[in-house]
Image (cartoon, rainbow, N blue to C red):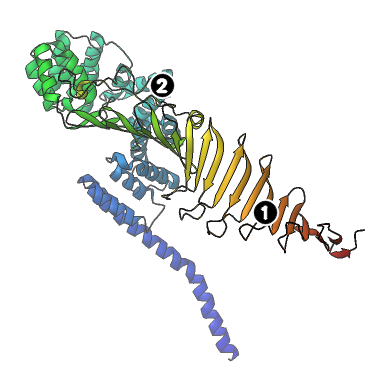
Amino acid sequence: MGAGQWYRTLLRVIVLISLLPFSLAAQHNGDRQLAMVYVAEASSLLQRGEHGAAADVARRGLQFAEDSSDLHALLATAHLPSVERTQQVLEAFERAFEHDRFVRLDATDVAADYARLLLRVGRPSDAVALLESLRVDTLLYPDLLYMESRALFALGRVRHGEQRASAGIRVYLDDPRFFRLLLERQPVAGYRDYLAVRRYERDSVDYRRLLLTYAERVNPTPHRREVLEHYFRGGGEDALASLLLLQDGRDQAAELERFRRLGGDREHDLLLRAYAALNGQLRQMLVEQMRDFEGQLIVDSDRNGVPEQLMDFRDGQLERWRIDARQDGVVELDVEFREAVPHRVEQRGPAGFSLLEYGNYPEVRTIRFENDEVTVYYPIAERLEILLLDPETAAFGDPADENRLPAVLQPLRLHPQGLLVDRDAVERNAAYVEHFRYGAQRPYRVTELADGVPLRSVEDLTGDGSVDHILIYRDGQPMEGMRDLLGSGRFEVLEQYRDGRLYRLSVISEPGQAAEFYQEFNDLEILRWDFDRDGIPDVEERYFGDQLIMRLYASGADGVFDLPIGFLREILNSGIIE
């Protein structure tokens, strides 16, 4: 190659290298522009109420711009109506603000939705931290100011919450949400509060909520009835308003019909209050109608449209009760009933997962824990009782008794102390415990217990159903064990323990014969071989850590090691022991 040709080739390489960053930048900009197309399409789908399609579009757009806050926020918003996807929504919102690259969407609007969800799932401190991280004056944004006030109240910072809510009342004269925050903190409302409520009158959902909040805090008087009728004339559809009218005692038959039309008979807490408010004839009619009820009831105590409890009934009997107190889509307590008493209880929480199965309630038949591993305890009969239900609400009576109150119309509450599962108490009262690996059908270890102290354990290390290891305990510490290394059904290895630590191994390859190999674990690890299997070791090796320091041979049949070979600093030392 000539000098000129070589120079031209080098020049081309330099030009290509210099253009490479521009090419990559162009591709990056092209991906971002394409991602904006997905943002526009997902936004359009959300406006039309097509949440599933919007989520799919946003997810595809993230393939071109993983750090697009707009796409993460749209994905979260698309899944927001689904309570079961709450954890996914929280993660999507978190990623949106982690990248902090909003282009088409307003970060303050997204933050308001995120803060609202954080408050719903019981994380007010995170909501406050989010609003503070925006570095904006929340007084300029009514949604952010409202969320900040709610979060401060939830954190117990009442004075600060009242200050922010009062500021919202002064600045946003037509927004009833701030006054409702203050009104919710009053157990009883007065006529001056009503005059303040009427200042916000307009055809809006927020005004109707304010009107109902006021009516809840007024004694049953003609004035309250007038307020509630005004609520219905304005388009209100909350069954709670109908319940308040039922409690007035006037024209209950017609009001009961409206109560049921608004879905009040599908909310357990409202249904109980309606039953208590009805007169004798209507009450008996409700009992007959609900005796064979089949379907699902909910409890939505904060009236936000996300139930904290779900109750499934069949033929008038409670079959399942699910509690999602945090309203985050994770059921903390899932109770299955059999013949009106708890039979199976799943509990989820920070400590992990537990599953109780009752025998004769409240006797526990089995209890399963899932933390780092899966353990299943089998309590001694009649030794372990765990109360789940409040005794005052658990007397459903005999299902065959025609005079009993239907389960649908009976209060249902957890024990005042909640479901307390003391693992130490479970161990003390268990006959044995099974240990499982995740996904395994068979336990790999079964341990027999006495007052919580292990007596004997059996292990299946290969998962084939055979016994591979047996360990005997004394005073809670291992004493001796046996291992089947070959899966032959015979135990070739014997173990001896001292102070809970493995002290000695003996290997017997032929049944009925003496051990042919020994290993001791002390400061020095000792290995011995008995080649002729006469019960007298022939060779001994001593190790310090992984270093062989001495080998000894027994030349006679007396078992005396009379030929030592030392290995010190890689120098072979040998000698005859006299």
Q: Nearer the viewer, residue 240 or 124?
A: 240
Q: Which residue is mark 1?
A: 506
Give the spatial CA distance, label 2 vs label 1: 53 Å
Q: Which mark is residue 94?
A: none
Where is residue 498 drawn, in percent x and y? 69, 42
Q: Locate residue 555: give its quadrant.
A: bottom right
Q: Amino acid at mark 2?
A: Gln
Where is residue 466 drawn, in percent x and y? 48, 53
Could you say whether the residue bearing mark 2 is in a helix, strand or loop?
Answer: loop
Q: Amino acid at mark 1?
A: Ser
Q: Residue at x 26, y 53 (%)?
A: 41
Q: Is residue 491 above or below residue 398?
A: below
Q: Is residue 410 above or below residue 27?
A: above
Q: Locate residue 456: give its quadrant.
A: top right
Q: Which marked residue is nearer to the observer: mark 2 or mark 1?
A: 1
Report if residue 59 is visible in the image. yes
The C terminus is located in which quarter?
bottom right
The N terminus is located in which quarter?
bottom right
**Label 1 Cα crowd, 10 Å radius (few <14 / some 14-19 / many 20+):** many
Q: Nearer the viewer, residue 394 or 533?
A: 533
Q: Is residue 104 above or below residue 151?
A: below
